[in-house]
Image (cartoon, grey):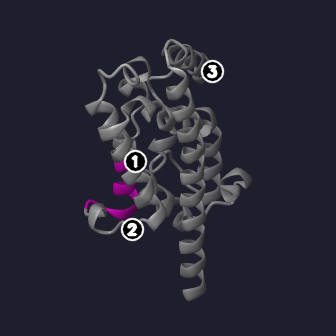
Amino acid sequence: MLSFRRGQVTLQQYKLLLCSLYEIYQALEEELERNCNHSGVAPIYFPAQLARLEAIEKDLEYFYGQDWREKITVPAATKRYSHRLRQIGRENPEVLFVHAYTRYLGDLSGGQILGQKTQKSMGLKSKKGLAFFAFPNVSSPKLFIELYCSQMNTMELTEEERNGVLEEAVRAFELNIQVFDDLQKMISVTENQL
């Protein structure tokens, strides 16, 4: 992530990130859709505004070609994150919003800046390959984030559920950190082989 923030991202780094994001968002969006009527999901379910999977698929096809599904690789931490999303979708859908909040709002709030830095860093002449960073159905990220947070605040949670949410929030951040650590290791191994 430091490479992204510094505007020093390489094509290889970005492609590996997209592969992981695909797996994570596939699990998240499938579980959100499956549980969209659950009281812990319905208030924050905004697929038209937030869904990332289709955008990531476009980016992967742009960089890997039409057979991209056969070419992508993801680190073990990504698989663990995806597994966790599917597990809570089945067992505790009331905490899915923690992961939706962590992923979507993080990507929405920093997406435009990171997209511009990525485009410049990789020397891309157009926005092709950068669909992940675009939220065409969100006219104002700031206002949408406010709406999203107000919707989250409508959820009534028991003391036990609040504790579960806090534990899951910590886990969400840990899982994201592990994904980025594993991606960095994959990049380092690949670069050392060159």
Q: Looking at numbered disc 1 in the image, what kind of residue is underneath it?
A: Ile
Q: Which residue is tagged 2?
A: 73
Could you tell me how far apart the alpha carbons at marks 3 and 2 are, in whole angstroms?
Answer: 34 Å
Decide: few, some or many residues near mark 1? Use Cα within 10 Å; few <14, some 14-19, many ≥20.
many
Res 56 label: 1
Q: SS at mark 3? A: helix
Could you tell me how far apart the alpha carbons at marks 2 and 1 are, in whole angstroms?
Answer: 14 Å
Q: Where is residue 87 in the image (x, y as percent from the top left)?
A: 35, 46
The numbered mark, 2 or 1, whose residue comes first in the sequence reads: 1
Which portion, as a residue range, is magenta? 56-66
In the foreground, 191 or 106: 106
| Horizontal arrangement in the rendering, residue 108 relative to residue 35 (left or right) | right
Q: Which residue is tagged 3?
A: 142
Write down the quadrant of residue 28 in the picture: top left
Q: Does residue 82 appear in this view?
A: yes
Q: Looking at numbered disc 2 in the image, what kind of residue is underneath it?
A: Thr
Residue at image coords 58%, 22%: 145
Q: Position of residue 148 (x, y in %)?
A: 52, 19
